[in-house]
Amino acid sequence: MAYKVGERVIYGNYGVCEITKIEERPDFIDPSTITTYYTLKSLNDRMGKAMIPANRMDQVRYALTRKEARELIDNVPAIEIDDFFDEGRNVTEDHFAALLKTGELENLITVIKSMHVRIAKQTEMGKNPSAAYVRLEKDAKAKLYTELAFALNIEESDVEDYITKVLEGNNPQQ
C-alpha cells in the first residue's frame, strides 16, 4: 500500500497517527542496506512518534472514515459475544488478548461485549469482577474509542454515549 505524507493511519498502541515523513535511510539492523522508513506521529500526545520500516507497514491501516465508523456502530448488535473459556485462566486471558492484538475493530467490540457479560455475571453472583476481564474490557475500549472519536470528531469521553444513542435509535448529528 502506498501511503503518503499527511495521511491518517492506525498503528498498534499508538492509535491514530499522521504520516509526517517518508525517507530512505540506512537500515537500523543492517546499515549497509537502504530502507524506506515511515515516521508516524501519534495524535495522542502521550505516545510520541514511531519510525516504521516499509516491510512492517502491513501493521498499519488507514483510519476509519466517519461513514465507516457509523456503519461499524450500526453493526454492533450483530457482533457476537465470544464465550471461549478454559479452566486455565491464563489460557482464557491469552485468547482475548490475542483478539485485542489484531487491532481489528470487530474483535475489539467482541472483547468489550464478552468482558461486559462476564463482569456482569460475576457481579450478580456477589463476586468482585476478574481483574483480567476488567483490564481486557478497558484496553479494548481505549483502542476502539480512540479511533471512533477521531472518525466522528468527538471527544473519547463521549464515544460510549454516542454509541448508546445510535443503538437506541437516537441519531446524533455530530
Image (cartoon, helix red, strand yellow):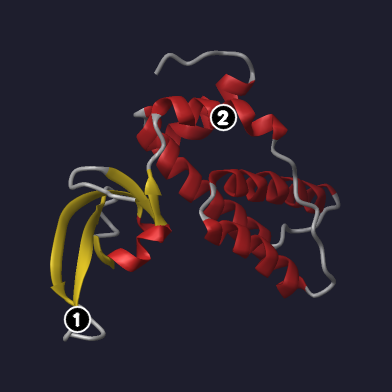
Judging from the image, what secondary structure is the residue with disc 1 in? loop
Mark 1, residue position: 33
Q: Nearer the viewer, residue 20 or 16?
A: 20
Q: Measured from the top left, where is residue 59 in percent x and y?
A: 41, 60
- Measured along the vertical axis of the image, is residue 128 above or below residue 163? below
Instruction: From this view, report whether residue 139 is shown above or below residue 89.
Output: above
Residue nearer the viewer, 125 or 38: 38
**Quadrant hosting residue 76:** top right
Rendered residue at 67%/58% (across/down): 133
Q: In this view, does 166 lie to the left or right of 52?
A: right
Give left or right: position of 137 versus 44. right
Dot 2: element: helix
Which amino acid type is shown beneath numbered disc 2?
Ile
User: Which numbered disc, 2 or 1, marks the residue that appears first in the sequence?
Assistant: 1
In the picture of the structure, the residue carrying the numbered disc 2 is 73
Task: Give the amino acid type for the residue marked by disc 1 in the picture.
Answer: Thr
| Picture residue at 47% right of the left edge, 50% below the top | 143
Query: Between residues 60 and 100, which one lies in front from this camera angle?
Result: 60
Q: Where is residue 5 in the image (x, y as percent from the top left)?
A: 18, 47
- The residues tagged by marks 2 and 1 sit, at their Cα atoms, a distance apart of 44 Å
State which quarter of the image contains the C terminus.
top left
Quarter where residue 39 is shown: bottom left
